[in-house]
Amino acid sequence: MTTSETVAANAKVTNQDNSAATRLTELHGVGPALAKKLERLGIFAIEDLLFLLPLRYEDRTQLVKLGALATGERCLVTGEVLLSETVYRGRRSLLVRLGDGSGQLTLRFFHFSRAQQAQFQAGVHVTCFGETRKGSAGLEMIHPEYRILRKDQDPAINDSLTAIYPATEGVQQGRLRSLTDQALRIMQRSPPRELLPAKIIERLNLPPLAEAIVYLHRPPPDADVELMMAGRHPCQQRLAFEELLAHYLSLKRLRALADTETAPALTDGEPEVAGFVRDLAFELTAAQRKVVDEILGDLSQPHPMMRLIQGDVGSGKTVVAAIACLKAISCGVQAAIMAPTELLAEQHWKSFCDWFRPLGIEPAWLSGSQRVAERRESIRAIEDGSAKLVVGTHALFQEGVSFGKLGLIIIDEQHRFGVHQRMALRDKGDSELGHPHQLVMTATPIPRTLAMAAYADLDISIIDELPPGRQPVKTIAIPDNRREEVTDRVRLACESGQQAFWVCPLIEESEVLDYQAAAASYEMLTEALPNVRVGLVHGRMRAAEKERGMQAFKEGVIQLLVATTVVEVGVDVPNASLMIVENAERMGLSQLHQLRGRVGRGATQSHCVLVYKPPLGRLAKTRLSVLRDTNDGFVVAQRDLELRGPGELLGTRQTGLPDYRVADLVRDAELMPQVQLAAELVQRASPENAAAIVRRWLADVHLYGKV
């Protein structure tokens, strides 16, 4: 789903609860061509214009004297044309000198027509708005908005702050403001219906919806612009609250629908599960046991489990998934595990082979890189049901793959899959059995308030303790001019029998990005460490070649593995105790935390060295400080959320989760407890209002959330 499609879906058919959506072509100046352009902004009806809120505001409520201008100001000025000329100083431009008795200002145009040039005759008065900057002959404005005044015409001064809207090709700001003015006049005659419970509006001291909409489109001159730009004005909070409520209600509706669907009730297999847990080479942690109990309870119900497991890197999510699979298989249905990369899927396949082959269960493997004969054999076994457990990549949900008796789906690193991909795998379930149970896992811990907003349709389990004996990884940050110290550290680790990762962002040197590439690092380290066995793995290698390199590292044949971020997930080498990350200042917190999680899986104290290129920017300095200060994935995730926003954390760019038009999941997180309360009130007291709120903000986009 493209960004424009998402925006369009978000806004489509706004306010249908109030009256039939009014066609855009009923507005003055809107024909079929302009209506088509407006659709790119998600504007399908007049009511949609009310919810296309400004990105920012400009103050055109007062004129600034030319003599009082300062560099970097965006302001409204007026003056008389003193001089107009076309110059060719490196680049053709039109220069217009204005004066008002207090000072002078130059208007500069690089793109202009003869007719435009002819407008600026000496003695003509002009009003213009733009940003001042230093020029060769004093202050100037480049391509300002301007209006030529008639003789004796006063400059037009707005009586409210000027809204700047999201733009699209072929629709100018002036046109959007004109259309919004018309929509606001129509709204005054027929205000949108209040759908929030009066108790909530009173408790949060929120303004009426119509009042909030007018204020945000046309703020008065004395409006607190700073508060509005921060998104914390009560009028913005009024709309943000209702939008958060719409998303929450839509997800709750999905969950309610799932609870009415049928799924195989998996009630057998207790002896098999108990024996498997008893024979493990390690004890499950209390957190793992708690999550296992929650999952087994879900699987015993005749409606689909919809559960998300959050667990930090190394917390033991995979063995919990194995227990769920064994339960399903013992009850006579198939289980499927899907991972986003072949490397991670292979890691799972090997782990499950080690666990399940002694039980007489042979896991099937399915991926896009399989040989034709092997793939055909896997597909046949999946279809006839002889493959009780299937592990694979995106290949699992592709055409030509059908399951004999699919009862459980497990999706790892769920945020890397699109919604339609997850739905495609879900639809492989046998209709006679009902829908398969769903378990999704993530090693990216999600802060509670964000999970409340984004995963209201899922039950959430958290594995919040590491296995016994695991020591927190010690993290340090070192500038790249101390590279020799880092290399010595690697040599000492390898001489003591340990292994190390050396991770670089790129495979080859780039002229554009000054990264330390993996290939160059491999050559440098091979030369600098002649007694260390160095290997190289990156994403452009063929699967078999990459697998040989990874296997050699796991077996200890390779002591130092130089790699790109393909090792971010799915590589489990307990003997690796040192992680070096090049250009750490250019990576996100969650990604760095994932890389750090590749070490610290054995009994030896592990270290992560973040190599950066100084000077560090403020954001990069903050990221590295967070990693030095904590190993807690939830703390890292919260700080990452604050620094980068929810898009990266939830993978919304990939998943098709609808964008928020007013609300901000970080800024407005404190509203979520009240949103939950409002949802209960509105669903209990007036379910028709709940449906209307979802239609107002989402139309049919809530269907995309179904997994």
Image (cartoon, rainbow, N blue to C red):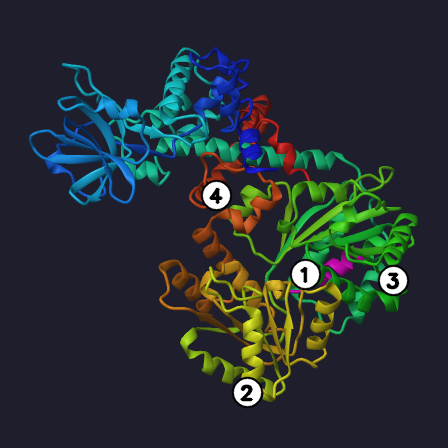
Q: Badge 1: how crowded within 10 Å, few (<14), some, or many (20+)? A: many
Q: Residue at 64%, 83% (x, y): give it.
A: 533
Please tell me which residue is depicted at 90% across the width and 64% down the height of the picture.
360
Which label's residue is closer to the chain start, 1 or 4? 1
Residue beneath label 2, please?
Answer: 492
- The answer to whether 601 is drawn above or below residue 298 in the figure is below
Q: Amino acid at mark 3?
A: Glu
Q: Secondary structure at mark 4?
A: loop
Instruction: Give amino acid for label 2.
Output: Leu
Look at discs 2 and 3 and give the one toward the viewer.
Answer: 2
Disc 3 marks which residue?
A: 362
| Sequence-earlier tag: 3 or 4 | 3
Q: Is residue 317 magenta?
A: yes
- Magenta portion: prevailing SS class: helix
Which badge, 1 or 2, comes first in the chain's sequence?
A: 1
Front tag of 1 and 3: 3
Q: Residue at x 58, y 26 (%)?
A: 699
Q: Amino acid at mark 4?
A: Leu
Q: Closest to the observer: 182 or 114?
A: 114
- Residue 565 vs 656, above or below: the answer is below
Mark 1 lies on residue: 317
Tell me the residue that label 4 is attached to: 665
Instruction: Tell me if mark 4 has few (under 14), some (14-19) or many (20+) residues whose alpha carbon lies within 10 angstroms of its own.
Output: many
Whichever of callouts 2 and 3 sits on the residue coming sooner in the sequence is 3
Which region of the structure is painted magenta?
Answer: 315-325
- The reply to whether discs 1 and 2 touch (Cβ–Cβ < 8 Å) is no
Estimate how packed mark 3 is, as few (under 14), some (14 to 19) or many (20 or more) residues with alpha carbons within 10 Å: some
Rounded to the nearest angstrom, the CA distance separating label 2 from label 3 is 42 Å
Circles 3, 4 touching at the beta carbon (< 8 Å): no
Q: Amino acid at mark 1?
A: Lys
Q: Position of residue 634 (x, y in %)?
A: 52, 58
